[in-house]
């Protein structure tokens, strides 16, 4: 509803603030302009607008906020807008076109590298206010430096159209993988989001083949044996990765303030978690022994559990390459392959502890809590095929009882299946123990 009033400074100062916005129209003054209104917001803000029917539709043009815009200036601007309408022009459309032209001119002078720099600066602000994680920015920087900077960094922002965008991503796919191609697409879509034309908008992600590599018991033994000659700090890092099932970034940046020694809990803060919420990790006896030893040897005031004077961040970091400690350990353990995806990665340790947990009878809910997934469906999509064997076993027992079937046969079958999954070393160990049992 619009009420009518004579626009004066005194009138505006006496206006009441309501719970809902309301409008008053400029009327009753010799300088009043038909169509000029003042909109009073619940926040107390007062905004001048000009309303007029244009091509049969109510159209509102924002003039400015009182008192930044005076009544006199608002009336003068309202007359100019009324003239534009009388000439068949829509001032809002004129504003939009002018803005787009400014953006186009700015884009013509901007390179894709400069666009990334601007995107990075904005991302850093989001990190400071807690909206994004620093790990996400580090990943984006790596994606840009390794796959995008050289081919497109020097190009003008407007030089990339839909066709060249698709060709760029095809080249990334050929050189790397679907996962890397998808990361590049996500970054480029975000970078171009504020531009008048985003050539990456309608390009879709490719379906990725999920990595399912886990270590068997023999491989775990070889890994542990390879750790024996390693420096203590590297040995402890690998053991914490294996014992906690947490992400590499969280383990490497583990801080003493995150450890509750009394309750045996590692509380990973929101800023380090992909799910953007704090995550409590229960620490086993073996994990606590490592932390207690490291705590006893730590220097006073030391921030990180795995400190390093050689890195900018102050803790040990791990990069891919032949000079990395993980490359050296897996080489020694015989866990490296020549083809892509054949070598054991650090993330495979996280997958191993989760998979073993499910295969040993644990459920998806427990595994999801351990991994710190934001949604159980994320865990289920990766580990449900392991959990189903436990469900099959429980269902077999239930149906056997229901049908009064002899349960001994199903137990034997289950034992045979479990024995078949053992390594040759484990089988010899089992049979030797069975021989001893029969002898005694």
Image: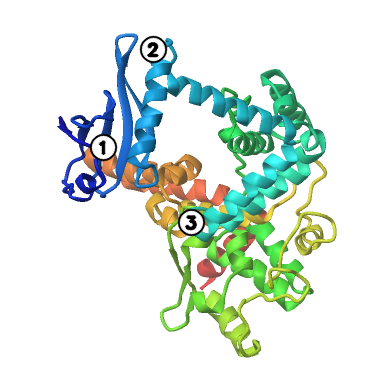
Tell me which numbered mark, 2 or 3, is placed earlier along the sequence: 2
Along the horizontal axis of the image, is 11 left or right of 434? Answer: left
Element at label 2: helix
Q: Residue at (63%, 69%) from the top-left corner?
A: 239
Cα–Cα span, label 2 and label 3: 65 Å
What quarter of the picture does the N terminus occupy?
A: top left
CB atoms of marks 2 and 3 within 8 Å: no
Which disc number belongs to residue 427? none
Which disc number belongs to residue 39? 1
* Vertical order, 362 against 389 (above or below): below
The quadrant where residue 72 appears: top left
Element at label 1: strand
Q: How is the image coloured?
A: rainbow
**Residue annotated with mark 2:** 86
Cα–Cα span, label 3 and label 1: 52 Å
Q: Position of residue 257 (x, y in %)?
A: 51, 78
Element at label 3: helix
């Amino acid at each position: 509803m619009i009420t009518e009033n004579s626009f004066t400074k005194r009138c505006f100062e006496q206006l009441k603030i309501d719970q809902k916005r309301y409008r008053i129209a400029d009327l009753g003054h010799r300088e009043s302009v038909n169509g000029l209104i003042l909109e009073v917001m619940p926040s107390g803000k007062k905004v001048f607008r000009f309303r007029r029917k244009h091509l049969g539709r109510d159209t509102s043009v924002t003039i400015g906020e009182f008192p930044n815009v005076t009544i006199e200036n608002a009336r003068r601007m309202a007359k100019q807008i009324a003239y534009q309408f009388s000439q068949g022009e829509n001032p809002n459309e004129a504003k939009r076109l002018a803005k787009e032209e400014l953006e186009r001119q700015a884009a013509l002078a901007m390179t894709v590298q400069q666009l990334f720099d601007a995107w990075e600066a904005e991302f850093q602000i989001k990190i400071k206010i807690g909206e994004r994680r620093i790990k996400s920015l580090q990943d984006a920087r790596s994606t840009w430096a390794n796959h995008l900077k050289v081919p497109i960094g020097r190009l003008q922002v407007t030089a990339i159209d839909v066709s060249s965008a698709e060709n760029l991503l095809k080249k990334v796919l050929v050189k790397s993988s679907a996962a890397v191609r998808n990361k590049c697409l996500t970054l480029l879509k975000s970078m171009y989001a504020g531009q008048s034309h985003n050539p990456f908008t309608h390009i879709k992600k490719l379906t990725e083949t999920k990595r399912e590599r886990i270590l068997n018991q023999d491989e775990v033994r070889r890994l542990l044996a390879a750790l024996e000659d390693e420096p203590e700090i590297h040995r402890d890092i690998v053991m914490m990765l294996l014992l906690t099932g947490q992400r590499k970034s969280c383990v490497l940046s583990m801080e003493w303030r995150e450890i509750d020694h009394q309750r045996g809990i590692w509380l990973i803060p929101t800023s380090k978690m992909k799910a953007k919420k704090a995550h409590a990790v229960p620490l086993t006896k073996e994990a606590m022994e490592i932390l207690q030893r490291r705590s006893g040897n730590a220097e006073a005031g030391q921030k990180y559990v795995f400190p390093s004077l050689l890195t900018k961040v102050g803790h040990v970091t791990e990069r891919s390459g032949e000079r990395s400690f993980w490359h050296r350990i897996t080489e020694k353990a015989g866990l490296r392959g020549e083809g892509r995806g054949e070598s054991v990665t650090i993330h495979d340790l996280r997958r191993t502890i989760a998979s073993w947990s499910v295969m040993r009878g644990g459920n998806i809910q427990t595994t999801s809590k351990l991994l710190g997934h934001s949604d159980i469906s994320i865990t289920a999509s990766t580990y449900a095929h392991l959990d189903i064997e436990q469900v099959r076993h429980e269902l077999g027992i239930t149906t056997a009882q229901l049908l009064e079937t002899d349960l001994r046969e199903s137990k034997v079958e289950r034992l045979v299946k479990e024995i078949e999954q053992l390594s040759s070393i484990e089988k010899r160990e089992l049979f030797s123990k069975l021989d001893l049992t029969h002898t005694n």
